[in-house]
Image (cartoon, rainbow, N blue to C red):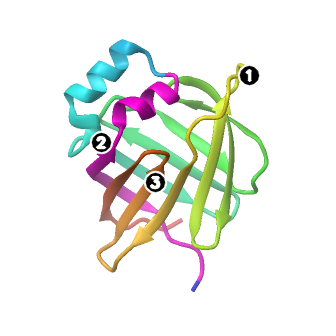
Amino acid sequence: RGKANFNGKWKLVRSEGEGEAFLVDCGMGWAMRRAAAAICYGVGKLFQTIQIDDLKISITNEGGSGGGRTMIMTLDGKACDILGPTGAMVSNTKWEGKALVSEMKKKDGGGPLPTMTRYMEGADGARRKDFEGGVQAFLRQGLMSC
């Protein structure tokens, strides 16, 4: 089978692992980390709308601490400037089999941020996003076509 179809609206239904450590690694300040923890790191509140084609992926966050922000990343594995929740970043995103892997770093020359791997799991439309030290599980809310 081909690449996973991530198109659609997704609701964060589970977050496991070291949320605080992950946000520290991403360079998020103390106040934003406290706000994220207060809303259980977005579980039940964070939605992501994803549009993907052969060349790029667009991810719009609604709710949670990263609400209202859209990130657009190219899928060729080459460096791409994006504005993430903690500021300017450089993303290298590419397909590895059926999974979409994003390696990122702060644009200001900081070290690498946790690598994120997005993939589908099971027949119920579940999508997982693994990162160093944890995993987030999303459920599809509706289908979209490109």
Q: Which of the two discs, 1 and 3, labels the residue nearer the N terminus? A: 1
Which numbered disc, 2 or 3, marks the residue closer to the eye?
A: 3
Determine if residue 85 is in view: no
Q: Quadrant of the N terminus?
A: bottom right
| Three-letter residue code for mark 3 | Asp
Looking at the rendering, the stretch of residues picked out in magenta corresponds to: 2-27
Measured from the top left, where is residue 50 in percent x and y? Answer: 47, 54
In the rendered image, which quarter is residue 143 located in?
bottom left
Measured from the top left, where is residue 49 in percent x and y? Answer: 41, 51
Q: Nearer the viewer, residue 57 or 33?
A: 33
| Three-letter residue code for mark 2 | Leu
In the rendered structure, find residue 130 and report the number of the disc placed on it: 3
Q: Name the residue under label 1.
A: 109
| Three-letter residue code for mark 1 | Gly
At 58% from the left and 46% from the top, the residue drawn is 115
Is residue 83 placed above or below 127 in the rendered structure? above
